[in-house]
Image (tube, rainbow, N blue to C red):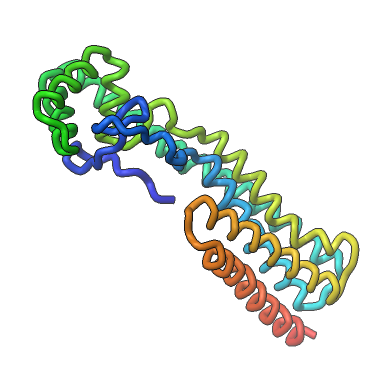
Amino acid sequence: MTEPDVGTHANRAPAEPVGGKDAGGRDTRHHRDVQGGAARAAVFGVSDGVVSNVGLILGVAGADPAPGVVRLAGLAGLVAGAISMAAGEYNSMRVQTELLQRELELERTELRRNPEYETAELAEVYESRGMAPEQAQALAETVMRDPDVALETHAREELGVDPEQLGSPLGAAASSFASFSFGALVPLVPWFVTSGMAATLASLVLAVALAVAVGGAIGHFTGRRPLRTVARQVLFTVVPAALTYAIGAFVGAGVG
């Protein structure tokens, strides 16, 4: 997972200021909040769940074992994958949150020690966005009068984050666990009601249907063409499944 840039002030990209307004007073709150870890974890969890488990299920099914073996493999893949995804998401979000909290503490210290410098720095940001120098200085001084507002504004401008919305590691982990489990369960369901080629084809059909839904959702939220994201998601689902099935069939035939 890509971590945010929490380097020096010189390397930090300006973000929207506090209150949902840009330097020109335009409302920016119509943008989607894409920082939350839970939503991102849910999307990737479902995708990873269906892709990894349909590949595992079809790989085992290709060897033509007893249906119970396929069910066991699918359940093992679901449980192991969900735990791994949740643990990885928790650790990643935890590190990210701790890094941002450290940067916020450094920023709080700078605001207390060098208020004049921080005021001038904020005024420069507003000037770079088209404000007149006098207006930029007045706005920066107004923001700096309240320590909480000053910290939130500098965090947005310099770190590109909202101090109140750093993300929840537990929320991201829970979302990742649940979504991966759902994605991994879908291609496994047919093996509880049927077996053989019927179950194999049903697993593939259900996995493709879920891939279409996930691709469509990604296209909707990212504003990209749904057909492209759907095609990409289906491709990433079908190709691994076909490869693992072929490998399973080859290995199964060799063992037999």
The residue drawn where x is 28% and y is 30% is: 25
On screen, residue 52 above or below 241: above
On screen, residue 119 above or below 29: above
The C terminus, quarter of image: bottom right
Position in image of residue 195 (x %, y %): 88, 70
The residue drawn where x is 46% and y is 36% is: 94
Q: Give the total of numbered labels.
A: 0
Position in image of residue 233 (x %, y %): 58, 65
247 horizontally vs 34: left or right: right
| Residue sitting farthest toward the top | 145
Write down the quadrant of residue 171 in the picture: top right
Nearest the eye: 69 or 46: 46
Position in image of residue 249 (x %, y %): 73, 82
75 horizontally vs 176: left or right: right
The residue drawn where x is 64% and y is 51% is: 180
The residue drawn where x is 77% and y is 73% is: 61
Position in image of residue 42 (x %, y %): 59, 46
